[in-house]
Image (cartoon, grey):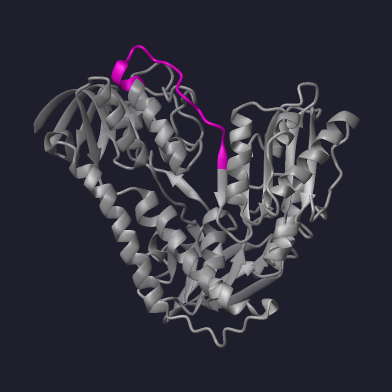
Amino acid sequence: MKQLNVDVAVIGTGTAGMTAYRAARAQGARTVVIESGQYGTTCARVGCMPSKLLIAAAEAAHVMASSSPFGVHAGDVRVDGRAVMERVKRERDRFVGFVLEGVESIPTADRLQGHARFTSPCTLQVDDHTEIQAKRIVIATGSTPLRLPQLENVGPGIVTSDDVFYWDELPRSVAVIGTGVIGLELGQALSRLGVRVRFHARGGSIANITDPEVLRCAARVLGEELDIAFQTQVIRAEQDGDEVVLHTRDALGKDNSERFQFVLMAAGRTPNVHDLGLEHSGLERGPDGIPLFDTRTMQCGTSNVFIAGDANNERALLHDAADHGKIAGDNAGRFPDVRPGLRRTPIAVAFTEPNIATLGKNWRTLCAGGQRKFAVGSVSFANQGRSRVMLQNKGMLRVYAEYGTRLFLGAEMIAPRAEHLAHLLAWACQMRLTVEQMLDMPFYHPVIEEGVRTALRDLAANLSKGESETVVEDTEPGT
């Protein structure tokens, strides 16, 4: 067996792993990366990029199909499912190619292919060919789609989000299990491309929303377009030819059966930490099996091990994985000089229509610990000027600020172009602006951002009054 002695070993070549490798190398550490599967990030292969390609096709179809209210009649819309998927895969492969170029730029001696397992706190064995003595180790093993036990070993009709982007043709029908970000994005896109889609949600949650008012609004707005069965339990399924018979139970205890070409498990992702030999690492682990770590340094306890990206399950998003990797790589490279790294304001976006976004501290976080110490400002987009012009006047925004300091704390929303609103507000949050400082900023007319100003005005008034529950509609087209 080959023997290697290195300063830093990074397990995984996704976003976090590649960033950690570069950061550790920049500290002058002799560093290797180990990959057990295909090179290429989750984002590029089966995540952010291919899903947005599918969503873009769905948006094009939806615009054509819904143009009549503008007086524009496009005629019958024909979706060529094979052509849709050909473009998704072609452009996906292009994005993956960019990632592979980055991997291939790593010296061959620094790259190992195989599955790494701990055999001691400082030793990794890669398959049966290499033993690595590493002074520091970064776990950046990513995640995989969560699989439901009751849907295991059914047949080819049970798929995960990873499988969708290898389809050659759009399916006839899909049952989507879950109303998280992945399920909603893919399900709405498929529905708009002509696929019969039904969502099954175990509870009543939607994407990242924790604010009850925004959640109610989202359920109503999405329910106008999508077939969503909340409070529904998946019992079992059987493969019957080229279809799956899905058995579910609703909130009233009634059993139902329905046929779909595919059942898409989109109930979340699970960190890839359970086959790493962590029992030999000496690390303290939580009930979920994930090593306990410091979110400021990515260090597991006081050990020589760091954990980054989806593997630590803190924020399973690409930009956070890159930040995790930078912090973990820096600290592994200069260990034992471990320092807190830059943690940016949390921001998460679901590219549904309307977009769903959260940033800063969400409702649940702010309500933790008892008495609420924050005010709320709200705006409905039902009559917001620019939104109504575009016939996208659906949704609401809720913004939060601290009593006394009047510091802006965060927001939750389902809103048109929320991906852009969320960035503006996240920047304000990270800069620790007060509500008054935000209102001093310029607002152009007519733009959707004027709805942000309306919500902030409501927030400022509620801070002064000590109130927080008024919902305001933006009906000021000239302001």
Whether residue 57 is situated above or below residue 347 in the rendered picture: below
Query: Where, by quadrant of the figure, is residue 224 drawn?
Result: bottom right
Q: Position of residue 184 (x, y in %)?
A: 57, 60
Give the residues drawn in magenta, as a range: 331-347
Query: Where, by quadrant of the figure, is residue 6 drawn?
Result: top left
Q: Verify whether residue 344 appears in magenta.
A: yes
Q: Where is residue 289 in the image (x, y as percent from the top left)?
A: 45, 35
Majority secondary structure of the magenta segment? loop
Residue drawn at the location 68% of the way across and 44% of the way down: 412
Q: Residue furthest right?
A: 465
Q: Position of residue 63 (x, y in %)?
A: 58, 73
Whether residue 119 is situated above or below residue 180 in the rendered picture: above
Whether residue 46 is situated above or below residue 376 in the rendered picture: below
Between 380 and 86, the one nearer to me in the picture: 380
Between 203 and 221, the one nearer to me in the picture: 221
Q: Where is residue 60 in the image (x, y as percent from the top left)?
A: 51, 71
Query: Where, by quadrant of the figure, is residue 1 drawn?
Result: top left
